[in-house]
Image: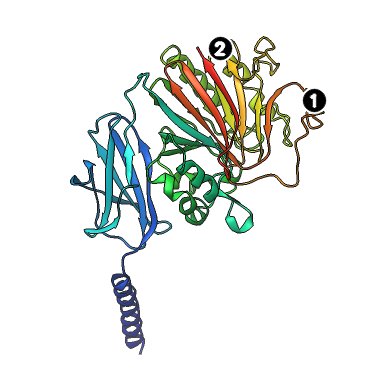
């Protein structure tokens, strides 16, 4: 009796597994996430996309859509749908390549908007631009507007070479399973041809970032904090977590070592992170960020970019103690800032603080009323255009495309 029961159980389990396997095979192949650029450098690029089932992964690319060569890829993750990845190598710098993605030799996506431009040569002084924004991944059902911001970036006359994210990439708790609906879907028109390099925000920390944020990105170093360069500029992403940096001592030591190793190699150095330091917004002054002001000011950092406050704020140049460098009195035209840096909050890429109205007349939210160059309280993103030692900055309204803030810096 026991033997017969055991055989019956085994037959049932075998049938169940056969049924599941057969069901998987019967599924029709579907694109679950549009292709997006993970990284793009002068000689290599990584392109990813998601499907509903495991399949043969390949990609065709070329400088012309009429002449493309094929490269095989692989499945790199099966956590939320199937993540496919193709790495391209041996690229020519500053060159436009079209691409098409394939699964089981079936074309899944391709066309005029599916392309990337490899970066300019290292240390090159060729012209390039990038966009920066924070707090993008608020769902539209809860008043978010990531699609509106993406649409405006898509309409820019000069297309950015890459974008940087100032934290809080996906609300409310940074889960992998929310990335498609809250981030990749509304941002798809620009992610397919502009690479994006995000920093961690406090909402991204509400779910273990090593199991969520790092699963969604392919970033340098440990992905909590990392660097990359583009042309004559150097970019440093930090993980400011909430109330204290991720592994503060280790991260600070890495930052100081990194800055020392790269002094004099680049014309421009940018730091970006999620939390603000000293501010006139509705957020508090985050002391853990202010602890790094001396590092920023003494190591030729030009700009510190952050999100967190769902508004816009450009501050006058700070010294290492967070005091205003009063000698830089022209808010629209700067020379090189000596022993200081400019801090910009751009935290309304997809979410706006309401109800709240900045009050520049008395700066009631700020102890030092003279520190702000420009307030703006609507959805927005920012752009930086660099040609050699000249930089042009713009703050742009997400809905109207209006340039609400601009300045130049020339070294």
Circle 2 residues within 10 Å: few <14, some 14–19, many ≥20: few
Above or below, 338 relative to 370: above
In the displayed structure, does residue 167 sit left or right of residue 195? right
- Location of residue 318 (image quadrant): top right
The x and y percentages for residue 166 are 55, 36
The x and y percentages for residue 299 are 53, 14
Task: Write the residue at 30% across / 52% down.
Answer: 110
Task: Write the residue at 76% across / 40% down.
Answer: 357
Distance from label 1 to label 2 (Cα)? Answer: 27 Å
Q: Give the residue pinned by disc 1.
A: 367
Q: Give the residue pinned by disc 2.
A: 335
The x and y percentages for residue 122 are 34, 22
Which quarter shows the N terminus?
bottom left
Circle 1 residues within 10 Å: few <14, some 14–19, many ≥20: few
As drawn, the label of residue 31 is none
Above or below, 369 relative to 191: above
The x and y percentages for residue 284 are 73, 33
Sequence-first disc among 1 and 2: 2
Q: Nearer the viewer, residue 204 or 368?
A: 368
Q: Secondary structure at mark 1?
A: loop
In the displayed structure, does residue 401 sit left or right of residue 1? right
Q: Nearer the viewer, residue 248 or 184?
A: 184
Does the image show residue 228? no
Q: Secondary structure at mark 2?
A: loop
Which mark is in front, 1 or 2?
2
Does the image show residue 358? yes
- Location of residue 2 (image quadrant): bottom left
């Amino acid at each position: 009796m026991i033997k017969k029961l055991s055989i019956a159980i085994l037959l049932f389990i075998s049938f169940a597994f056969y049924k599941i396997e057969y069901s998987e095979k019967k599924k029709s192949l579907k694109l679950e996430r549009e292709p997006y650029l993970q990284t793009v450098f002068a000689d290599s690029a990584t392109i990813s996309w998601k499907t509903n089932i495991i399949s043969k992964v390949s990609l065709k690319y070329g400088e012309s859509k009429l002449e493309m060569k094929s490269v095989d890829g692989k499945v790199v993750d099966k956590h939320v749908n199937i993540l496919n990845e193709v790495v391209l190598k041996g690229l020519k710098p500053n060159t436009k390549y079209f691409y098409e993605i394939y699964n089981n030799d079936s074309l899944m996506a391709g066309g005029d908007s599916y392309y990337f431009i490899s970066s300019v040569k290292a240390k090159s002084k060729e012209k390039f631009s990038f966009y920066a924004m924070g707090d993008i991944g608020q769902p539209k059902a809860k008043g978010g507007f990531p699609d509106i911001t993406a649409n405006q970036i898509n309409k820019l006359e000069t297309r950015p070479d890459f974008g940087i994210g100032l934290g809080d990439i996906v609300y409310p708790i940074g889960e992998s399973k929310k990335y498609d609906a809250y981030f990749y879907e509304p941002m798809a028109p620009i992610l397919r041809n502009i690479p994006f390099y995000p920093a961690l925000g406090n909402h991204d920390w509400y779910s273990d970032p090593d199991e969520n944020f790092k699963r969604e990105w392919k970033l340098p170093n440990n992905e909590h904090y990392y660097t990359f360069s583009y042309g004559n500029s150097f970019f440093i992403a930090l993980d400011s977590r909430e109330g204290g940096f991720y592994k503060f001592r280790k991260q600070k030591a890495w930052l100081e070592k990194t800055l020392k190793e790269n002094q004099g190699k680049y014309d421009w150095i940018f730091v970006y992170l999620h939390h603000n330091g000293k501010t006139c917004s509705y957020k508090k002054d985050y002391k853990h960020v202010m602890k790094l002001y001396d590092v920023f000011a003494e190591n030729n950092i030009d700009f510190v970019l952050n999100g967190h406050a769902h508004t816009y704020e450009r501050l006058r140049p700070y010294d290492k103690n967070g005091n205003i460098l009063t000698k830089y009195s022209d808010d629209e035209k700067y020379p090189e800032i000596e022993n200081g840096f400019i801090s910009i909050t751009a935290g309304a890429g997809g979410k706006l603080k309401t109800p709240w109205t900045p009050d520049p007349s008395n700066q009631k939210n700020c102890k030092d009323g003279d520190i702000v160059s420009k307030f703006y309280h609507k959805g927005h993103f920012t752009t930086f255009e660099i040609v050699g030692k000249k930089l042009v900055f713009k703050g742009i309204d997400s809905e109207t495309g209006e340039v609400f803030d601009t300045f130049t810096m020339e070294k």
